[in-house]
């Protein structure tokens, strides 16, 4: 058995015990060691033995223990708002789905699943839908992040398989980051890359319209126009061939479509001047990049959502692959294309067939493959054609074609494009089942049936990271309430639908063995994914399973790199070079519109159901923030720290403005994380339409949405500190974040300040024990107490002058206010001198901007190393280092001035 505590929690006495598990955030797949104390307290650290991170963790991984709280958990099955038993809930799900299928056929139902599921969960859901319900209407939120990469890989490589390993970052001589903010979205990989740079001089080129934190350590930044990546790489392909950099031996022996790809590239990008003009770059910079790529044998091209989340994402992936095929730079140490995955188990989901256009185990819908899977599963009605991809799926729900949907571990009412359509669809749908560990999500509010799922620390299974490493995620805490594993929930429903013989599972290990066996079934080396060596793994072996890369074929060892032998998985065993032509954005861009780009922040994850619980993770970017170039801001009257209304054909939003020259002119950037639980009017999915979709992958373009941005000038501003979560009802701007002991809600509105009871639910002004009103200046200050304990305090100002939040927020951490604190409460400042931390820069050590500025000034700090020695900032995950440099630069500029 694994060396860790009993998942039930074990005895309350006894020594600390440790469990090796895997981080639940991005696709890096970092190993985590959870230490559980005798009293149940949990601490986490990086696993130095895990090949992905070798002991490193990012700010989110370091704060995992902060999120292991009961706040907001879905604890019991519910039908409507009524708590029910598991039997009643499962019977009702099975009845509704069975009745719908009987009346309207198998394509009238659907599952929408998630890269947050474990592979075993994914496997059983896919088997039920495609093998026994008989429809391929199961799609995953991986459609939003990885689908174009899948298409590109399958067309070029013949398989959905990343060729290399993270070690290639460390032995490359040149790493090209394309549409990848590695510093924020995959910080541990970025730290590995920076360590290699320091040790062996690895050169870094960033290809990105934005000046992200990756640029801080880069040798060159190509800030090209959004959506022109394919053109840039077509030009590079033509340059490589024209200047004698074709690996003629490799191409002749192992590649097809070479001349067609080159002809298309030359027609699209005939010369460097044309590429530079159309990409919005200086010709000299393009020429230098092309020459450096050409002269370097060990090149890794790392790409992510800036490539994938595009209406031509699939073609751009193939434009990148073409470069490595032409030069033979693939399958060997330090070279190759490298797709970094967004989610912790997006790849595991694709291994089992979690996308609607996959069947199972890297098989599709040919008659031979359908027959093979049917025989393995002994399934009566295997789906014979692809199902509905995510955008089409929710359109079908809106149209009434799909009448029942089961949503697992994801929040499409926020994350899908045209989230307004998704919400209308769910509202009209006759049956919406939601399995989640959180009760109140934007999607969960539409559920007819809620099923409580285990969360990280409670569930047990496997995940696959970006370099094909399969790792165990292990339980080390008792489940919350009546929560169950997703695989168990699906298994129970399958049995109630009449498929008990095919769903006998009593453990995740059983599912893993079957999954491994299917991967090897009639494979014979024809499919990349094969872990048949583990199909006979016993329970003890599964519990102790160490991380390994696939494939791991029976009788062989796990394989780190693929394609080094020149053998690909297309039918003829050769790589395919694709003819690619850069295409315009399939959206009209009105005069004066800016192109809205979306993406992640450093310290947040998806829709914040987990990271939003952590006060330290919420402090770096406490509100939804729209990044705007100074020229665009000036032209529109936008001011730094002000508010803006963003309007598109899909919807509207309000956000705080940050004016920064890191944002390219003509574009704006808004993070993806905020939901109706955290903000009044800034759900990113409501701004992006679902019209611009890659025609091959079905992946929406989330990076180039035309938007009008104008100032929004409130008549008053306010903030509320409160112990329980509050969603203000005034109809203006608000944003909530966690603070130690409670929540901080920033607010603004137009017109008169509303009555508190109609604006802030749960707060009765009659119960306020302290109140101050300044009718002349439009000010209001109120506090609610229970004995000596502060429950809430509200500050409102018509002139925008509000006290600092730091000291006041700290009052929620204590159960008893001292006389001095009580006296200073409505003044908004502590008696005596108390420093305010300000916005957090280093989440790992909670170091704020004000403390940084003071230390730089008072201690005469001149480098990031000196800041680290003085405050520890930047010494853990390193994600804040570029921002520390920026703070230093501004501080020294002020001194010179």
Image: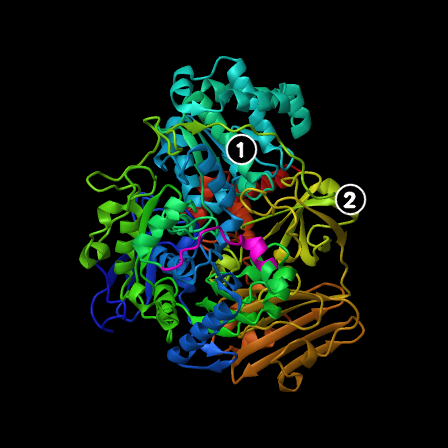
Say which of 134 and 143 sits in front.
Answer: 134
Please state, as top left, top right, bottom left or bottom right, where the N terminus lies in the image: bottom left
- Circle 2 sits in a helix, a strand or a loop, which is it? loop
Q: Above or below — where is 420 with respect to 497?
A: above
Image coordinates of residue 845 in percent, x first then y, are 44, 54
Disc 2: which residue: 590
Identify the main secondary structure in magenta. Answer: loop
Left/right of residue 657 with respect to residue 412 in the rendered view: right
Left/right of residue 359 with respect to residue 304 in the rendered view: left
Query: Looking at the rendering, which quadrant does residue 650 occupy?
Result: bottom right
Which label is found at residue 206?
Answer: 1
Total numbered labels? 2
| Residue 382 located within the stretch drawn in magenta | yes
For disc 2, the neighbor class at 10 Å (few under 14, some 14 to 19, many from 20) is few
Left/right of residue 464 with respect to residue 729 in the rendered view: left
Q: Which residues are magenta?
A: 380-395
Q: Above or below — where is 484 with respect to 300?
A: below
Q: Above or below — where is 733 with respect to 149?
A: below
Scheme by which the image is coloured: rainbow
Say which of 470 and 282 sits in front.
Answer: 470
Please state, as top left, top right, bottom left or bottom right, where the C terminus lies in the image: top right
| Residue 447 located within the stretch drawn in magenta | no
- Circle 1 sits in a helix, a strand or a loop, which is it? strand
């Amino acid at each position: 058995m694994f060396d860790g505590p009993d998942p039930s929690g074990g005895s309350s006495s006894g020594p600390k015990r440790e469990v090796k598990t895997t981080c639940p955030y991005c696709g890096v797949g970092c190993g985590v060691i959870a230490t559980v104390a005798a009293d149940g307290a949990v601490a986490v650290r990086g696993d130095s033995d895990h090949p992905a991170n070798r002991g490193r963790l990012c700010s989110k991984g370091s704060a995992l223990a902060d999120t292991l709280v009961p706040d907001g958990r879905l604890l019991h099955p519910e039908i409507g708002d009524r708590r029910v038993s598991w039997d009643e809930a499962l019977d009702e799900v099975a009845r509704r789905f069975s009745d719908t299928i009987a009346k309207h056929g198998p394509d009238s139902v659907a599952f929408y699943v998630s890269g947050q599921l474990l592979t075993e969960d994914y496997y059983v859901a896919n088997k039920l839908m495609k093998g026994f319900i008989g429809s391929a209407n199961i799609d995953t939120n991986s459609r939003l992040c990885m689908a174009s990469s899948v298409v590109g890989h399958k067309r070029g490589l013949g398989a959905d398989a990343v060729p290399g390993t993270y070690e290639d970052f460390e032995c490359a001589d040149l790493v090209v980051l394309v549409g990848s903010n590695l510093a924020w979205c995959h910080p541990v990989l970025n730290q590995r890359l920076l360590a290699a740079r320091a040790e062996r001089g690895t050169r870094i080129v960033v290809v990105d319209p934005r000046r992200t934190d990756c640029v801080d350590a880069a040798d060159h930044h190509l800030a090209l126009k959004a959506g022109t990546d394919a053109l840039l790489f077509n030009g590079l392909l033509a340059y490589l061939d024209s200047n004698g950099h074709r690996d003629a031996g490799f191409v002749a022996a192992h590649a097809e479509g070479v001349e067609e790809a080159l002809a298309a590239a030359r027609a699209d990008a005939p010369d460097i001047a044309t590429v530079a003009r159309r990409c919005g770059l200086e010709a000299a910079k393009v020429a230098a990049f092309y020459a450096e790529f050409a002269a370097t044998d060990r090149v890794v091209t790392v790409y992510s959502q800036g490539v994938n989340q595009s209406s031509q994402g699939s073609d751009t992936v193939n434009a990148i692959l073409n470069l490595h095929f032409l030069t033979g730079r693939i399958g060997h140490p330090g070279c190759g294309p490298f797709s970094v995955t967004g989610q912790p188990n997006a790849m595991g989901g694709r291994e089992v067939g979690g996308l609607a256009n996959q069947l199972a185990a890297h098989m599709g819908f040919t008659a031979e493959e359908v027959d093979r899977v049917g025989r393995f599963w002994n399934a009566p009605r295997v789906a014979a054609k692809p199902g509905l991809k995510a955008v089409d799926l929710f359109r079908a729900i809106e149209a009434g074609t799909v009448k029942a949907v089961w949503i697992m571990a994801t929040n499409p009412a926020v994350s899908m494009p045209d989230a307004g359509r998704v919400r209308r669809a769910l509202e009209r749908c006759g049956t919406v089942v939601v399995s989640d560990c959180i009760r109140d999500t934007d999607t969960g509010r539409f559920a007819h049936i809620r099923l409580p799922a285990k969360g990280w620390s409670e569930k047990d299974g496997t995940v696959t990271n970006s370099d094909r490493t399969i790792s165990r995620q292990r339980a080390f805490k008792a489940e919350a309430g009546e929560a169950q594993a997703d695989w168990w929930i699906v298994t129970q429903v399958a049995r109630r639908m009449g498929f008990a013989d095919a769903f006998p599972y009593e453990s995740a290990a059983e599912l893993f063995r079957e999954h491994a066996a299917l991967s090897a079934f009639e494979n014979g080396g024809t499919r990349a994914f094969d872990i048949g060596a583990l199909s006979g793994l016993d329970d003890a072996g599964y519990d102790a399973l160490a991380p390994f890369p696939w494939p791991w074929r029976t009788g062989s060892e796990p394989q780190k790199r693929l394609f080094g032998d020149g053998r690909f998985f297309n039918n003829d065993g050769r790589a395919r070079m694709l003819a690619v032509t850069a295409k315009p954005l399939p959206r009209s861009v009105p005069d004066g519109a800016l192109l809205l780009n979306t993406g992640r922040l450093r310290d947040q994850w998806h829709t914040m159901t987990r990271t939003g619980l952590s006060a330290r993770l919420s402090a770096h970017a406490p509100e939804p923030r729209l990044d705007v170039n100074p020229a665009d801001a000036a032209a529109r009257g936008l001011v730094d720290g002000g508010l803006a209304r963003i309007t598109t054909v899909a919807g509207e939003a309000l956000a705080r403005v940050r004016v920064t020259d890191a944002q390219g002119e003509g574009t704006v950037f808004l993070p993806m994380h905020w939901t109706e639980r955290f903000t009044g009017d800034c759900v990113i999915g409501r701004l992006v339409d679902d019209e611009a979709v890659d025609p091959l992958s079905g992946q929406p373009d989330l990076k180039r949405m035309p938007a009008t941005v104008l100032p929004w000038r409130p008549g008053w501003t306010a903030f509320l500190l409160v112990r329980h979560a509050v969603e203000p009802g005034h109809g203006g701007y608000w944003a909530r974040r966690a603070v130690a002991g409670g929540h901080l809600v920033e607010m603004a509105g137009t017109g008169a300040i509303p009555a508190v009871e109609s604006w802030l639910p749960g707060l009765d002004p009659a119960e306020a024990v302290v109140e101050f009103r300044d009718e002349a200046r439009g000010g209001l200050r109120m506090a609610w107490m229970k004995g000596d304990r502060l429950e809430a305090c509200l500050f409102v100002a018509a002139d925008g002058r509000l006290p600092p939040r730091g000291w006041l927020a700290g009052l929620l951490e204590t159960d008893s206010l001292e006389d001095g604190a009580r006296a200073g409460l409505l003044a908004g400042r502590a008696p005596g001198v108390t420093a305010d931390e300000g916005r957090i820069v280093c989440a790992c050590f909670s170091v704020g901007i004000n403390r940084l500025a003071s230390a730089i000034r008072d201690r005469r700090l001149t480098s990031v190393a000196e800041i680290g020695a003085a405050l520890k900032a930047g010494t853990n995950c390193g994600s804040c280092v570029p921002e520390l440099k920026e703070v230093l630069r501004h501080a020294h500029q002020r001194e010179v001035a």
